[in-house]
Amino acid sequence: MEFLGEVAAWFSDPASWEGRNSIPLRLWEHVSLSATALALGVLIALPIGLAIGHSGRGARAAVAITNIGRAIPSLGWLGMVLPITLVLFERGGLGFLPALIALVALAIPPIVTNTYAGLREVDRELIDAARGMGMGERRILTAVEVPIALPVILAGVRSSAVQVVATATLAAVVAGGTLGDFILQGIFVRDLPRVFGAALMVAVLALATEGLFALLQRLATSPGLRAATDVGRTS
Amino acid sequence: MRIHRTLALGAVLLALVASACTPGGGSTSPSASESEAAKPAVTVGSAGFYEAALVAEIYAQALESHGYTVTRKLELGERDVTQASIESGEINLKPEYLGGMATFLGADAASDPEVTFANMQAKLAEKGLVALNYSPGTDADGFVVRQETADQFELATMSDLAAVADQLVWGLAPGCPDNPVCGPGLLSTYGIDISQLEVESLPPCSTQMAEALNNSAIDVAQVCTTQPDIARFNLVLMADDGGLQPAQNLAPVVSKTLLDAAPDDFEATLNAVSALLTTDVLTALGVQVAVNQESLPDVAAQFLADNGM
């Protein structure tokens, strides 16, 4: 109980809310980094997933290659990327950029895999019917395949988002700030309430992200599909 | 600094005399068989990181060359673990850092190693432990700059650095503003107000910190004074002329029981080893272990051979 009181004291200390080491600033660093990483991840992964899902070609190679993103731990990505970004951009090579690269690598695989899987699960007869109605390939993709696969695709995005939010803490080891900086501070000055408080915020943020995407996923499911099955995550 | 050097010189001379007087000081130790019965078993432990483990291994090999039987329990964990082990008798020798050990035992850690050593010794005695001579080298927190920055601003000391602090980008530990020997200490000792500086928050003593400095992303980096990166990137350590950092020289901590049971060559051997451990030597050994990935026993054996032990 005493410990929780110390955690509460950290949160209620006015010093925690102002200056360049404030909770709002660290939270903003965390959210902006995570959001950028997720947006870039979607921009890169979605076209790949759609291409291999629609054509059915190159799937094995694409999934294998993008999976390198999560096969290499994020700390490993940071270690590999930092020396390069530092040489290229000096001070700009610290913080946001190397952390972003590591997080994008982490965000891509679930989206590629789920998009591919979502499209492949679409009933072949529906696609044949669409083709028989004279739809072009692009139209089949946008009007038939994507709407049906959308819940599965979004499940992939949701999975990425949660991982990215949780992992963004690591940015602190490359001067990226984020809530992870509080965790490092707490470790270095033996202030465990600060470690716990920051970890708690990361957990809440991750859960909120999960909830937000769960809601999006629900809204994006066409009423017909929603009645038939409750689509969960496949990744 | 002068106290340092005088002590170091004194310790080296003492060590030379001691080793000259020790029968069978060579590695073949002809008199080992007759004195073996009198030599108590040594169990050496260390904290869980390479420098502590390496120094423990060097102590171990030096003692073995004098006919002692040494069991190793290296990299046990953090100080709370190693301290519990030596108090319980599970180990009876471990290398320690003066400031860290003193603070852990509730004693004051000063920048003067002699003072810190005395404070630590008093607390150790209560637990039936004794520290032998400390090394001239210290693994304290320090601040380094690139050679070019040192040349440009003619920097050699923290006071020099303070004069140009606001023209440089600083790499500081997360939590520096809350650490008495970081933010508040820099302000009170050197007038460096970190809240007015350009700062990047990076783990101290980390490779990232050193790489950021080497690549000009930052201009000043908070490091550990024996960090291999200092030698690797030819960085310049600013002398702590204001005496901000607590002394972190290395000393073997042994149980009183062991010390009393052991013949004189036990203490003399450990003191001779400690006397060799300058900051430069510790940094160079660190490069071999942490950068070149050479094995601890090899590095320790080579080091002792190079120094004729």
Image: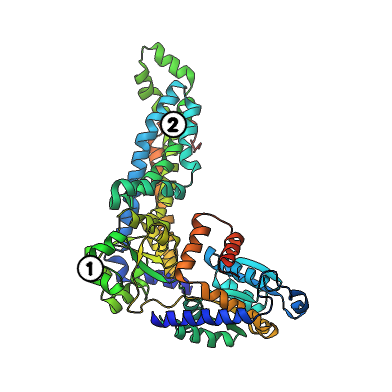
- The dot on residue A53 is none
* Left or right: where A111 falls relative to B194: right
Label 1 crowding class (10 Å Cα cut-off): few <14, some 14-19, many 20+?
Answer: few
Give the letter of the chain under mark 1: B
- x then y, percent, for residue A196: 45, 64
Considering only vertical position in the picture, is B216 above or below B72?
above
Mark 1 and mark 2 in contact? Answer it, CB < 8 Å.
no
Can residue B152 be seen?
yes
Residue topped by disc 1: B164
Q: Tell me which amino acid carries mark 1.
A: Val
Residue B150 found in image quarter = bottom left
- x then y, percent, for residue B80: 56, 73
- x then y, percent, for residue B9: 47, 80
Residue topped by disc 2: A115
Give how far apart the Cα atoms at labels 1 and 2 are: 55 Å
- Residue placed at 77% from the left, 75% from the top? B33
